[in-house]
Amino acid sequence: MATTERVFRTEKVTKVYHTGSVDVHALRGVTADLYAGEFTVLLGASGSGKSTLLNILGGLDHASSGRVWFRDLELTGLGERGLTRYRRDHVGFVFQFYNIVPSLTARENVALVTEIAEDPMTPEEALERAGLSHRMDHFPAELSGGEQQRVAIARAIAKRPEVLLCDEPTGALDSMTGVQVLEALEGVNRELGTSTIVITHNAGIQAMAHRVIRFADGNISEVTQNETRVSPSEIVW
Amino acid sequence: MMQTLDRKLLRDLTRLWSQSLAIASVLAVGVAIMVMMAGAERSLRETRDTFYERNQFGEVFASVTRAPIGLLDRIEAIPGVAVVETRIRNPVILDIENMLAPGTGMLLSLPHSFAQGTFPRLNRPSLDIGRWPEAGRDHEVVVNDSFAKAHEFALGDGFYAIINGQRRHLTIVGTALSPEFIYTIGPGSIMPDDKRFGVIWMDGTALTAAFNQTGAFNDLSLRVEPGTNLNEVLRQLDLILAPYGGTGAYLRKDQISHSFLDAELTQLATMVKIVPPIFLVVSAFLVNMVLGRLVSLEREQIGLLKALGYRQSEIAWHYIKLALCIGAFGVALGWGFGLWGGRGIAELYAKFFHFPYLVFVPYPSVYAVSALAGVAAAGLGAVFAVHKIVALSPAVAMSPPAPHRFRAGVADRLIHAVHMRQTSMMIWRSLTRWPLRAGLTMLGIATSAAVMVAALFMFDSMDALMDKAFVQLNRQDMILNFVQDRPRSVIDDVDHLPGVMVSEGVWSMPVRLSHDQHERRTVLEARDAGSELTHLLNENDQPVEPDSGIVLTQRLAKQLGLKLGQSVSIRFPSIGDREHKLAVVGYAAQSFGMGAYVTPETMTRLTGRAARVTQSNVMVDPDEIDALFAVAKTTPALSGVVEMRAVRQSFTDTIAQNAGMMTTINALMAALIAVGVVYNAARIQLSERARELASLRILGFTNAEVSYILLGELAFLTLLAIPLGLVLGYLLAAGMVAGFESDLYAIPLEVSRVTYFRAAWVVALASALSAAVVWRRIDQMDLVSVMKTRE
């Protein structure tokens, strides 16, 4: 359900990390547009800047220079409070290492978000969409890696975010569970129209995207659009 | 060349500096108190013993009305008696310039040729400044140092004394200190008052002449050969002295100055036993907590070290060394504070106890023991933290620990019923998953509240004691002491003194009370029936009357092993060896002294004498108090006047002086425990849950919401800990009160609501402050880098 409506816009975004005596230029003036409802895949080698951009888009980090908009909201102008508010209202995150709370069951992990969101779906619905309705009352230690990641996805989508940002969501998983996780993400994007941005090292995943953005050396090297998309199960791992 | 592991140790210490400092401070308090109190106790004890020996302090004391010098041979013949010293000792009224109220002086005779170097064989005073009175100069006196200081007397200054009815001017030629008056307290008083009471040494010849005691004595003390049966000496002495008005010989332990000093030493010893262990245990717990976290963080490194071939003991030693470093730092800190505080304590004691010198000697053994205890506490905490992980096989250690298994228990189902928010649920699960840790943390915080209660309750107890002593039990404005006992009719004379509105007579007789093997020398008091000025109340504040039996102070009854209805044997040393029996009909709850009470009728029946009066309690018209003072200063029948208002004042002053400083120190100590426990607990929680908290921040939780999870748990524990701490504090206070009890006084156990409130407040505040410091760290948490790492 790709549109021409822009959800993110960046203008000459740079990010410099000062580590000891060296300056690391993670982003060197990235200008990009990302579109609402699209499933976007960011590809690139380690250190090419894709995670840094994702963090800035997600309101986890500040750009060193340049400007970033989420729709009409300029993220680069927000302080800590504004960014927290932005994350709370609009963004869902999925990370490589799941980051779910070990002391809460699957259902409770999702409820953690639905309790603070404006118009959430029920934890049960979110887990259903992530394909985990049968293990709702299990604690993380009782779930497999793929199941834990699907709890994380359910938690991310439960608040009906406008964007879903995923940093290597399948990085710690084997191919079979990886496919299950990708299916969950694809379903969310298709059914809810959530703009989804996925970082991956796995080039095969690009085949399921609307749009693929390649990173090299802190900048965008190429943007391509897929005329035809493949389903996750057909992806060559 | 420094070992690599040692370099790691140094870096760990630098990194953990704030937590290490918090632990070291708690440990330091324990060590400081140990050094301070144990040092003070030993300094005081050894100074006292040296002073006693050097100045030949007596072992047995006795007073008579008048006995011939010739009696000396018979006394010396008592088996075991080594040295006997006789003298004249008389209380007199003093008239001092610029002081309206009459003072009381204790006149003591010096051997005739004293100035020429014939020292008394026992109870020798040490000259501080000036010289001794010249033989035959009946106006020259030496006074105790503190009396001279209180009045700012210089040598050559003087005052008047009513000696045997004559107003005589006495000139001060020197000041002295004596082992008999290390703690200087006037007859009938409960607190030292150096303005109103003075010890006065006069030439023996002059004094015996003034009191018509030529060829006689009225006071004696003696020392015995080692191994002598002291009770037998007392018995024989009583037999010899009875015909001369003997009031019953007594041992050093009943000598007033000695027993006050002894009570103080008991208090110090009690403090040393109770307080430092608390701090040592808390710091052991803290070391255990912090090191436990460190080794679990370094689990993989430990596995690696083992894989490289390091021995278990080497790795364990590495971590234990870290604890020992913290311990050593705490000990050094504690020594510093202890030395500083010890000087302060010595100064404080110098105010109350009059020694020719009192230095706070840092005894090496006290330091050694405190260091050993401090380092051992830290080491023990470390051993418990380290032993499990160090024992893991390298392969297991190198792989990350299995995730914590949470299970929904019975309690969970209950909790679900109340529909808690998920953040609260996280707190709840953390508490139920690690109940021991939560319990110990709570106990740590509770300890802080307990220490605070134990520090503050003294004020309440003192208030209760004052209210009891000066309002409920004794309402008289003054006590007039007579030189000798008088017939009952003397009360009519007292009634006619200016300003006297009510007067009541009291007849006191020294007695020996016994039951089974227990014997106590005390004073039997007969008060007028229906007395308005003094009351006897039992432990429930109900009036008790002796009727035809006897009422005993609770502590006296306890010492004699007597229960209500049992009979006690009574002997009057001044009358003879006859034994009487009376049934105990009630207990009197009193903080001071160990009195026994009968009716005047019973006293008459037991002694076979018509009713007498030895002192009079009076209520005085405040407008005429000066006139009464003026008359008292010239009344030969009076040996002393105790003004209750002044007693009360000196009591209040003493408490204010000591308690103010002590409370500040104690409050700081209590706060330190709270800070040490809460700060470390919060830091550890933060380290364990950084990832969890960061992911919540990413989900859009605000700082406050995230902090709630971390600090909410500690706030909850603090909330639980405070009431527990208040209960523990009450028990601690009870323990202290029991430990402080002596023959002289018992402190009532009283803890007010204000004290509980203050203790709760200090602990809550200290917890909140330490939490705030950790809160700032949550603020500064780097979300991105936390998420990148694998737990």
Image: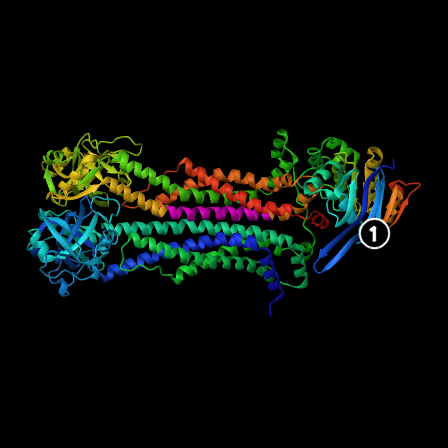
- In this rendering, the count of numbered labels is 1
The spot of residue B719 in percent (x, y) is: 52, 38
| Above or below for A177 versus B88 | above
Q: What residue sits right under mark 1 in the picture? A: A219
- Name the residue at 13% across, 54% down: B170
Is residue B393 visible in this depiction of the protein? yes
Q: For the magenta stretch, what is the residue range?
A: B660-683
| Above or below for B715 versus B369 | above
Q: Quadrant of the N terminus of chain B?
A: bottom right
Q: Amino acid at mark 1?
A: Asn
Q: Main secondary structure of the magenta part?
A: helix
Is residue A172 visible in this depiction of the protein? no
State how the image is colored.
Answer: rainbow
The spot of residue B573 in percent (x, y) is: 14, 45
B482 or A215, nearer to the observer: A215
- Name the residue at 84% across, 43% down: A33
| Above or below for A58 versus B534 | below
A145 or B776, nearer to the observer: B776
The spot of residue B746 in percent (x, y) is: 31, 42
Badge 1 local density, few (<14 within 10 Å), some, or many (20+)?
Answer: many
